[in-house]
Amino acid sequence: MSIIKTKYGDLLPCSGASDYRKKNRCAVLYYDSGAVRSVYLEEPSVLSFPAGAFQAEFITFYEDGSAKRIFPLYGQTTAYWSIEEEMENAPYYDFNIAGEVLHIRPQCIYFYPSGKIRSITLWPGDEISVNTPAGIIRTRLGVELYESGKIRSIQPYNVFRPLMMHAENSSLQFPED
């Protein structure tokens, strides 16, 4: 597979040789315009984004080439590879959310086209407490932010993780002001 050149560096897509944790999917997808839509990397790699340096194994892009979502790990859970094994290898990062630094192991980071963080989705079983306009709220899903960095939405803690796949448009939403 050829190297894919992006503003975040040269990316080596998956070669197609599958191991027990690799998902069976196209390594590179393109928009109709020919712009790169997503790249599934051969190996997790640390790349520099406007919001910081993060490990990425799968990256989706806006049509203008800006990173849209990054998944630090993108393995497939099977009888041979569990979600717990995948999570053990997931890195933690410090994020400044609502004036507090939170130590989070993101399953996915979603960016605005500007490069600012739009949302952080947590791994199943993880939880954080976030200082919101309604007080401190525990969540097991993650948090969505306005481009200004203010809290946009959060899914309050429940015994069960909601069936939502990402932290956007959660049930508790706040106006930016």
Image (cartoon, helix red, strand yellow):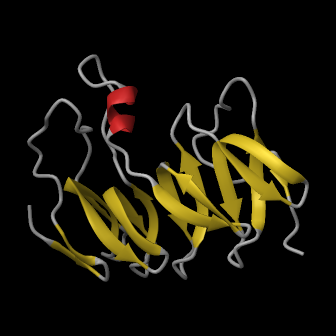
**Which quadrant would the C terminus be assigned to in this image?**
bottom right
For residue 63, side relative to residue 169 (left or right): left
167 over 114 or under it: above or below: above
Q: Residue at x 37, y 45 (%)?
A: 90
117 and 103: which one is in front?
A: 103
In this view, 152 is above or below 125 = below
Which residue appears at 18% of the width and 29% of the height? 20
Of 13 and 133, nearer the camera is: 133
Residue at 52% across, 62% down: 94
Residue 86 position, x and y percent, is 34, 35
Image-based side of 12 in relation to 32, left or right = left
Residue 54 image offset from top left, x and y in percent: 38, 65
Q: How many marks?
A: 0
In the picture, residue 33 is in which quadrant?
bottom left
Position of residue 46 measured from the top left corner of the image (x, y, whole percent) = 28, 65
In the image, residue 9 above or below residue 2: below
Q: Is residue 75 left or right of residue 13?
A: right
Q: Residue furthest top?
A: 79
In the visual, does 13 lie left or right of 133?
Answer: left
User: Image point 75% across, 50% down: which residue?
Assistant: 154
Q: Identify the image quadrant of residue 2.
A: bottom left
Q: Quadrant of the N terminus?
A: bottom left
